[in-house]
Image: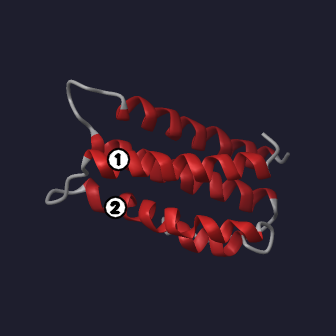
Amino acid sequence: MKPSTLEWIKKAESDYQLGLSLARRRKILVRDQACFMFQQSAEKYLKARLEEANLQFPKTHQLQALIALALPAEPLWSALIPAACRLSVYAVTFRYPGYEATTVQMTTAMQDAKAIRSEARHALSL
């Protein structure tokens, strides 16, 4: 595996674990931040797969665009597009006043990130 791919994986896994930790908090709820970390993890896992496949990708938070770029290497990933679309909104939306993630949204974000993480890790033989 390429060293650059390993760097993406390290960042992706760190974001995922932080998202899990934030999602488990009970006293001070930080759902917005958990959703953001799950989006970031999925984004970095997708970029890791693209990096390993030598597929160029732009600076974007739109996960469905990253999946579209990965389809030549991972054609079955089209099934992940709905999860990618749901997660993509967390890159920006909940980082600013006026929006607040619900527990249901956070749980869905966690499930979507887990699905993308699982597929990426399998594709990368992790």
Give amino acid for label 2: Val
Residue farthest toward the right in the current orientation of the protein: 1
Which residue is painted at 39% across and 59% down in the image?
A: 91
Work out whether residue 42 or residue 2 is closer to the camera in this orientation and state it: 42
Q: Is residue 81 left or right of residue 94?
A: right
Where is the C terminus found, in terms of image quarters? top right
Which residue is painted at 77% across and 66% down in the image?
A: 74
Q: Which residue is mark 2?
A: 92
**Mark 1 vs mark 2: which is more N-terminal?**
2
Work out whether residue 85 or residue 41 is closer to the camera in this orientation and state it: 85
Q: Is residue 68 above or below residue 116?
A: below
Q: Is residue 84 left or right of residue 72?
A: left
Q: Which residue is mark 1?
A: 106
Q: Would residue 60 be visible to someone looking at this image?
A: no
Q: Determine the secondary structure under disc 1.
A: helix
In the rendered image, residue 122, in percent from the top left (x then y), is placed at 76, 47
